[in-house]
Amino acid sequence: MSSKVRVRFAPSPTGPLHMGGVRTALYNYLFAKKHQGDFILRVEDTDQTRFVPGAEDYIIESLKWCGIEPNEGQGYGGDFGPYKQSERKHLYRQYVDQLIESGHAYYAFDTAEELNEQRELAKSQGKAGWQYNSITRQYLKNSLSLSADEIKQKLDEGEPYVIRIKLPRNEEVRFYDEIRGWVVVNTANMDDKVLYKSDGMPTYHMANIVDDHLMEITHVIRGEEWLPSAPLHILLYQYLGWEAPKLAHLPLILKPDGNGKLSKRDGDRLGFPVFPLEWKDPKTGDISSGYREKGYFPEAFVNMLAFLGWNPGTPQEIFSLDGLVEAFSLERVGKSGSKFDPEKTKWYNQQYLREKSGEELAQLLKPSLSFDVSDEFLAGVCELMKERALFIQEMLEDDYFFEAPQAYDEKTIKKKWKDQTPEIITELTSRYEQLEDFSAKKIEETFKSFLAEKELGMGAVLPNFRVLVTGKGMGPSMFQISELLGKEEVINRLKTGLERLEKQKA
């Protein structure tokens, strides 16, 4: 086995990539980078019946968007290809034959109907969970129970078959999991899994083991759902005379409410995406939302995912991808599942949004604008609004930056507009008309000296000033808004608003 760390992410192209799959890819990526190793993408498409067009491209695009790209594999090249199992079909049979010759595998000719009969019979006798194993196989149609002539005849006549692993009876299988410690399973609780089908395709178990060996994978980091298969995989390595890679089984990502694994249904029910990118089902046309299209930054999505099962052992929560590489270790991955929190995900996005400059945010927003505005002005809007937004699109929700208000917040008017307000606003407008330096600092100084001179409280003037300029009852600093809008625009809005409101009162 390679002395260099080599890990793989091996999804099946059966649909969009769930965020749990992205987290598996992320942990593999972080582990590989931490140890200056290789991160490989392998597409496991042995089950052609479940293949979904477009799913492979979706997986590759998702990893690119997240910034966790493989340095080898499907779509990336490398010395251990091909990296798609359907293109490696010719590689597997020799290892299956090796298992048959060594007595660790056998032909089974039972039809699906015959096996179903056995299950129903067991059920009628009160036996739950019938298995094809060391006890039942002696009564079934396979190369362990049939004569050599019968076996030859069936093979010569092209009778459909599968090849199953021959598990020993009542033997303990032990292996060390890098996250869970020692795992011990008795073969009495396992069945003779199918390794190869008569159509020439291996099952996942066989292909997975052969590919990991031939690609010199040193560590298999995968989801907890593969833990029950691990003893079988350990035995296959043993029977083929190969050194097994180190195994690490990641905890589940759990739904936000109740128990159980996070699913697409939970996202639909509670209103959050479970996929990195939007996915359109090629069969039904149904569209599932994605984090990218919902306005999440990839760095925020990845940062959030890293913390679903792992923690750095410090209070720090915000990590760049390089920072995650530096801090990551399998020792700090937990055994128990992590509850997904959609609100925390929004919080992460907010932190990354706040870290960006107004100029950066303006460039991200510009393509979605339906009107012309200068880069400088848009950057100013972003700088003012970023503390209040979770997503960049929210920074455009207050349209008063781009056009004068046509309506005024009724609550503010009702509560704050008094008989003397028109006179106060007229005089304040006059002061601003005389200002040559219309900077936020000077606007604020003028405002405060006006209040002091007139012996007025902030609450008697500022809300009315705000509502006339913006139409809103709340928002960022009025002095900064005013500087951004400019002297002429602010004065026009004050005069126009005062005129409108006085007409309404009349």
Image (cartoon, rainbow, N blue to C red):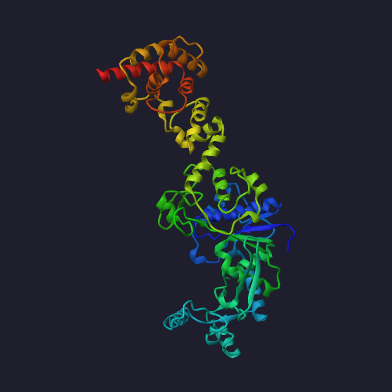
Image quarter of the N terminus: bottom right
One can see residue 192 in this view? no
Does residue 421 appear left or right of residue 366 in this picture? left
* Residue found 65% across the figure and 44% down from its top: 323
**Rendered view: 436 above or below 18:** above
**Rendered view: 128 above or below 48:** below
> Whole-percent x and y of residue 171?
63, 78
Does residue 179 appear left or right of residue 367 in this picture? right
**In the foreground, 198 or 195:** 195
> Whole-percent x and y of residue 300?
55, 43
**Rendered view: 79 above or below 372:** below
* Residue found 51% across the figure and 26% down from its top: 380
Q: Residue furthest right?
A: 3
One can see residue 134 in this view? yes
> Whole-percent x and y of residue 347?
51, 42
Image quarter of the C terminus: top left
